[in-house]
Amino acid sequence: MIASQPYNTAAPCRSARPDEAIRRPRALLLASGLAECGILATGLKEIVDVMAIKDTTEAMRLLQARIVHLVIVEDCDNNYEFCSRVRRFSQYAYIPVLVLIPRDSLSARLRWLRAGADACLEMPVSRPYLLAQVDNLLVNRARLWAPFYTADPSGLETGEPGPGADGILWERLNQAIMQQLPNAALNVSQLARELHMSRPTLYRKITEISKMTPAALITRVRLDRAASLLAATGYPVTEISRMVGFCTRNGFGKAFTKRFGLSPSEYRRKVVL
């Protein structure tokens, strides 16, 4: 039983290597009026890092500042508006949302599903069922983005570090960028927090290793991944632009053309033919 022994189910989004904390999922728990919020947070910490807060303004600030893999909210009007906002912004739309609703409340379930929630759990909920649902959402989302997790941006025309501290940092940096590729707001400050480094130190390290600024490196990874998707999949160009973290197709097209000398559509035709 999950309730009585460690929750060790393997998942693509988690790693058995303790030195790679970046791979441990982070959940945002927004529950202002939930008496068992502390109990939920304690139980969830078995498989995810939990940020438990009570205010939607703070929740939005954390989404902008931190990398979040799952959002859990209780059923209330403020949280409903928050969920709707999350779904409207492409940089957050990929994050799964789990809603805690009253028991036997079909109207609440329908309301939240229409707002874009991925799943609803009736309260009170058993701990094993809660953990299973959270794990299921994380695993399924990880499978959806599996090409991003497994892609290797080390083919960049940059200096590649050999074995040692810089090599480990480069691996963790690549992992952090690839996991958050759909996030248009990703920047060096977020990466520094995830890697437990100061922003100036990470900025200097990236510049030394890649000969590029962090912003340029992130953009390069986005564009190279987009090129792979254009060549290997049938996704529309607009969808691919969102998948790699561009807010508009126009902005994506200009950046892609600057990088490869061809528009995304022209590149696809040339590669496929």
Image: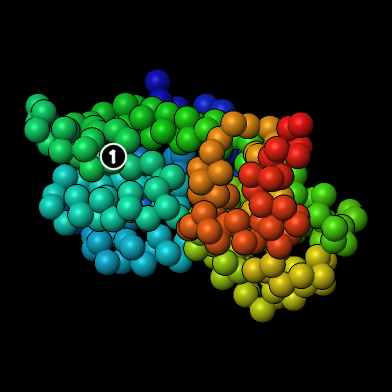
Seen from the viewer's position, the closer of residues 101 and 88 is 88
Residue 102 at x, y = what percent?
12, 36
Seen from the viewer's position, the closer of residues 80 and 247 is 247
Residue 133 at x, y = what percent?
36, 30
Quarter of the figure that contains the C terminus? top right
Q: Residue at x 69, y 45 (%)?
A: 266
Q: Which amino acid lies under the numbered mark 1 shown in the image of this protein?
A: Ala
Q: Residue at x 48, y 35 (%)?
A: 141
Q: Residue at x 32, y 61 (%)?
A: 59
Q: Is residue 180 left or right of residue 64?
A: right
Q: Which residue is mark 1?
A: 117
How many numbered circles does the render carry?
Answer: 1
Residue 129 at x, y = what percent?
31, 26
Residue 65 can be seen in this image: yes
In the depicted structure, whether residue 23 falls above or below residue 271: below
Local crowd size for mark 1, using a 10 Å CA cut-off: few (<14), some (14–19), many (≥20): many
Q: Quick one: which residue is furthest to the right in this view?
A: 162
Seen from the viewer's position, the closer of residues 267 and 154 is 267
Q: Is residue 241 left or right of residue 233?
A: left
Quarter of the figure that contains the N terminus? top left
Q: Residue at x 85, y 58 (%)?
A: 157
When asked about the image quadrant of residue 208, the answer is bottom right
Q: Is residue 13 left or right of residue 134?
A: right
Residue 38 at x, y = what percent?
27, 50
When asked about the image quadrant of residue 272, the answer is top right
Mark 1 falls on what kind of element?
Answer: loop
Residue 21 can be seen in this image: no
In the depicted structure, whether residue 104 falls above or below residue 66: above
